[in-house]
Amino acid sequence: MRVVIAEDAVLLREGLVGLLERFGHTVVASVGDAPGLLAAVAEHRPEAVVTDVRMPPGFTDEGLRAALELRGRHPELAVLVLSQYVEQTYAAELLDSGAGAGVGYLLKDRIGDVREFVDALDRVAAGGTVVDPEVVRQLLRRRRDPLDRLTPREQEVLGLIAEGRTNASIAKELFVTEAAVAKHIANIFAKLDLPPAADGHRRVLAVLAYLRQG
Amino acid sequence: MLNRTALEALTLRPVPFLRSAWPWRCAAYLMASVVPGAVIGVAAAVTQALPEPLLYVAGPVVLVVSLLPVARFERLRLLLVDGVPLPEVPDRRRREAGLALMTLLALWWIDLLMVGFTVVGPVLLILTPLVQPEVTPEVGGAASVAGVLLLPVAAYTVTAWGGARGAVVRTILAPQGSELSEVLRSRARLVDAFEMERRRIERDLHDGAQQRLVALSMTLGMARLDLAEDSEAGRLVGLAHDEAKQALAELRELIRGVHSPILTDRGLAAAVRDVAGRSPVPIGVDVEVGRLPAPVEVTAYYVVSEALANLAKHSRATKGSVTGRVRRGTLVVEVSDDGVGGADPAKGSGLTGLADRLAVVEGRLSLSSPIGGPTLLRVEIPCA
């Protein structure tokens, strides 16, 4: 997969390049600021972008704004945003773009879990949605209603769905059968009033519904 | 020197006072009234010399033209009796003009009369044998002794009038309350400096330690891939990796405590949503305000963070809410909960800290928290 990386800390940027190449991806460009990111995407037409939120020149949310702009311009481009801190507003803005398909919002801490980080990027590139477990944890803690109706196990499953996991992966994580996972998910959809008529993105919608209520 | 004005010097014990420079400074201060007196003299002379129609115009013109220099002179000579710097006031020009007019019309001749009676009188008495040779030596000697005895009295009188006059001038140039507002301004500057320092620390941690820890954690994660989980090296690297991740998580919370990046990026509404989202007690957020001046945003955010922390710690509430609106140029933020109430500013330092912080931006805090609840904290901050 052809990837563009935007990260202003040189140490980290070079590390990311090495990491992704080790897992067989091609980093076509690595840049240090938001204008550079926009230019690199225009030039190289990558399949995925990994970007920091806070970048030069203003050191506020330039990276996020650039990501949103790229989502608008290239709906097929997968975008994984790395953030130094949990910020639901940012996550919600990002997931709102393109109905949450092919997009991810992760804490930078997750880069350390190398394999999971690369998996997350792959899921985003495959059109999936990845939300940092920390964001999900906060949402679950805050929303008593209607998430109150979910059992602790169902909340756990919803958290893993938000991470973009498949049923098989969730089953493995929780040491249960896939059938059990499917049953939990059906319960979640029912409790959250997500009708079966909705398409395969119901998993994403379940997460989005709660992020958007902000 | 502890005594910084002539009036304060009067409270010294007699000997140190008489030996100090204050009587001399006051005498010099009063003698300086020769200068405005001369201005009046010049104005009079000019007026005299002119023919009839011009005469009525020229006198007032000379007076008006001299107002600014005379005011400057008053400011300067005030240093003789008052070492405390004058604060800046907004209507300075108007005040100076008033003082100059007062000096030209009244103060200068009162000063000179004062010096005349208190200083020149005793000096003449002392010199009686010289200036009045016709009196008998006894009378002359007695007069001289009386003059010498009157000198310390003169020192007190001159200092008292000089000090009082200085106090009047200070009051005119910088009315009461202006020093208070100067204190408020310096306090606001302190808070600003403190806030900038917090932002700098946050930025340094973010750009330095945090980035390095992420890089370290990534490197350890890569090393882990190459090592067998059950090997000794693999186990140790795994431990180091977990430690690094733990340090990152702690650093993230620390940075958030130092300064909220979201507040800077997105303003009060987003930052309040963020802090409410972290509360263990569910908090409804209804804040509809645009971007506000930075000190207002920072203060309001600080108040909400503190209030929500208190709410979580003490209120035993099952839910709470934060509302925020701007009404007629004033930000009104209300934090309420359904807890047990009984919050008392006298008991905790938290609430008084909030009030202090609000005072800097001229905000107001009101609290209703009867025993048994509910608690409502209301904060108003002018946004102008």
Image: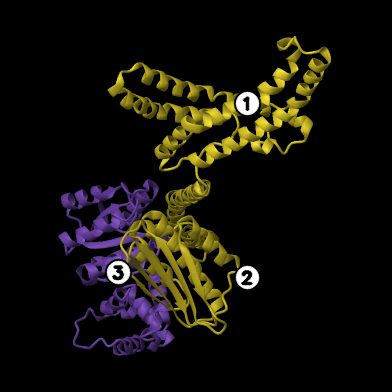
- Measuring from the top left, give residue A110's x and y in whole percent: 40, 63
Is tag 1's residue or tag 2's residue first in the polypeptide sequence?
1
Q: With respect to residue B143, does B316 lie above or below?
A: below
The mark closer to the camera, 1 or 2, is 1
Q: With respect to residue B61, does B137 lie above or below?
A: above
Residue at x 29% of width, y 74% of height: A212
Dividing the picture into quarters, in which one does residue A109 lie?
A: bottom left
- Measuring from the top left, give residue B373's x and y in whole percent: 52, 82
Q: With respect to residue B97, does B269 lie above or below?
A: below
Q: CA distance from mark 3 to mark 1?
A: 80 Å
* Tag 2 subunit: B
* Tag 1 subunit: B
What's the residue type where badge 2 is placed? Lys
* Chain A palette colour: purple
Q: CA distance from mark 2 to mark 3?
A: 41 Å
* Tag 3 subunit: A
What's the residue type where badge 3 is placed? Ala
Residues at discs 3 and 1 in contact (Cβ within 8 Å): no
Q: CA distance from mark 1 to mark 2?
A: 59 Å
Name the mark on residue B115.
1
Chain identifier, yellow in the render:
B
Q: Which residue is under mark 2?
A: B347
**Few, some or many C-alpha atoms within 10 Å of disc 3 (few <14, some 14-19, many ≥20)?**
many
The mark closer to the camera, 3 or 1, is 1
